[in-house]
């Protein structure tokens, strides 16, 4: 009992010494260094953007429109009589000149009817000449002469009808063009009004666009124009027609640009971009990279005003060339944002840096 009591006292003393040693270690430990408060002044600084002074220049204002090519003439050649097709001398896709035979129908009894009509006309001619001689001698009344003359004229009309009916069996091309499609084959029976082939005139070619009511007033028949096809080809032409009546659905006017197409390289129905010169005006030459979109989806550019505030200017692209794009919309003198426009909004305060100064510094470092 005495030994266990002594052991308990020793254990208590050891525990007390261990606790005291920990407290002493904490008192001697150095206090943890506190981090300085975050410097938020950098967040208050306006963002930096690169700017360039731009001055509007005299430039031909061009209306860029989306259009399509359209054949000058496209017709379906139809039969004017009935009969079985016995010849189709042209293949689909082949070129034909005006007057070339497209198809030939069986003549049937048309040759016989023409011969009969000619024989009757000859008979009526003899009768008429005989009555004329008798009338001069007083043996024919005027009424008889009139009847004989009417019979002759009726016989002549019958000959013409038979000749026309026979001519209808040969279908010819009404103009130079390409046989785009054949609707019938040899052996088919064609009735009056049946389509035999589709003929397309490709030279000249029309490029058609719809122009709004504001811009159409600045165009005139005979004005020059240019079109860029989706193939990359660029063709020049002249405006040959401006519709006098607006499309009731879009309130736009049809404008036709006529371009030469001697080799038929331009097909009907191709997409094209039409450039129609409106007048000479002031425009800015800018890089496409500085264009931006407003929240409403309006295309434009951003500039910095005298108070270093961002201003958004809606623009209209009026021309393109190797140097860039020509736009109208900003004022004559403007400080355009060339770098950083994606990260600032209209009304934001910015710190503009002139890109010409940056270029000059870079040249100095390079030298």
Image: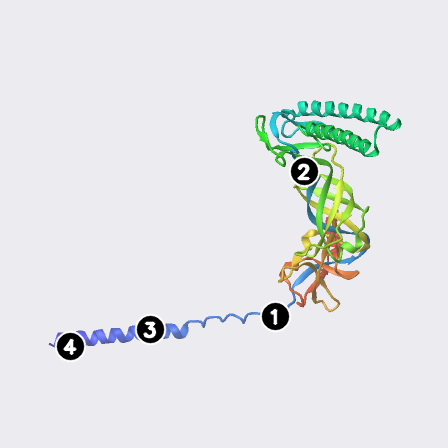
Query: Relative to 233, does residue 185 appear above or below in the rendering?
Result: above
Instruction: Report whether 221 appears left or right of 200.
Output: right
| Quarter of image, res 91 | top right
Locate the N terminus by quadrant.
Answer: bottom left
Q: Which residue corresponds to mark 4?
A: 5
Q: Which residue corresponds to mark 1?
A: 41
For the question of whether residue 367 can be seen, the reply is no
Query: Which residue occupies the foreground of this view, 207 or 138?
Result: 138
Specify few, some or many for label 2: CA neighbours under 10 Å numbering under 14, 14-19, or 20 or more: few
Q: Give the image location of residue 229, x and y in percent.
A: 69, 41
Specify few, some or many for label 3: CA neighbours under 10 Å numbering under 14, 14-19, or 20 or more: few
Q: Which residue corresponds to mark 3?
A: 21
- Disc ID at residue 75: 2
| Quarter of image, res 307 | bottom right
Label 3–label 4 contact, CB within 8 A: no
Q: Secondary structure at mark 3?
A: helix
Label 4–label 1 contact, CB within 8 A: no
């Amino acid at each position: 009992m005495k030994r266990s009591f002594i052991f308990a006292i020793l254990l208590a003393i050891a525990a007390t010494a261990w606790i005291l040693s920990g407290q002493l270690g904490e008192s001697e430990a150095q206090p943890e260094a506190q981090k300085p408060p975050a410097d938020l002044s950098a967040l208050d600084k306006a963002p930096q953007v690169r700017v360039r002074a731009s001055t509007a220049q005299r430039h031909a204002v061009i209306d860029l429109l989306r259009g399509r090519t359209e054949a000058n003439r496209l017709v379906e050649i139809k039969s004017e009589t009935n009969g079985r097709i016995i010849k189709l001398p042209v293949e689909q896709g082949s070129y034909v000149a005006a007057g070339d035979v497209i198809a030939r129908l069986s003549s049937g009894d048309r040759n016989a009817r023409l011969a009969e009509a000619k024989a009757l006309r000859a008979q009526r001619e003899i009768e008429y000449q005989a009555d004329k001689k008798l009338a001069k001698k007083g043996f024919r009344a005027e009424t008889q002469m009139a009847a004989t003359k009417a019979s002759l004229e009726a016989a002549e009309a019958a000959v013409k009808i038979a000749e026309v009916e026979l001519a209808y069996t040969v279908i010819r091309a009404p103009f130079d063009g390409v046989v785009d499609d054949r609707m019938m084959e040899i052996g088919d029976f064609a009735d009056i009004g049946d389509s035999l082939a589709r003929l397309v005139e490709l030279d000249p070619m029309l490029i058609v666009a719809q122009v709004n009511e504001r811009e159409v007033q600045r165009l005139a028949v005979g004005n020059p124009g240019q079109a860029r096809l989706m193939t990359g080809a660029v063709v020049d032409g002249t405006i040959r027609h401006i519709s006098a009546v607006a499309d009731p659905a879009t309130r736009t006017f049809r404008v036709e640009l006529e371009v030469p197409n001697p080799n038929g390289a331009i097909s009907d129905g191709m997409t094209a971009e039409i450039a129609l010169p409106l007048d000479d005006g002031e425009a800015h030459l800018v890089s496409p990279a500085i264009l931006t979109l407003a929240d409403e989806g309006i295309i434009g550019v951003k500039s910095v005003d005298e108070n270093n505030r961002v201003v958004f200017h809606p623009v209209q692209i009026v021309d393109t060339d190797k140097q860039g794009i020509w736009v109208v919309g900003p004022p004559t003198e403007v400080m355009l944002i060339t770098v950083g426009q994606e990260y600032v909004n209209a009304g934001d305060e910015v710190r503009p840096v002139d890109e010409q100064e940056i270029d000059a510094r870079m040249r100095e470092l390079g030298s």
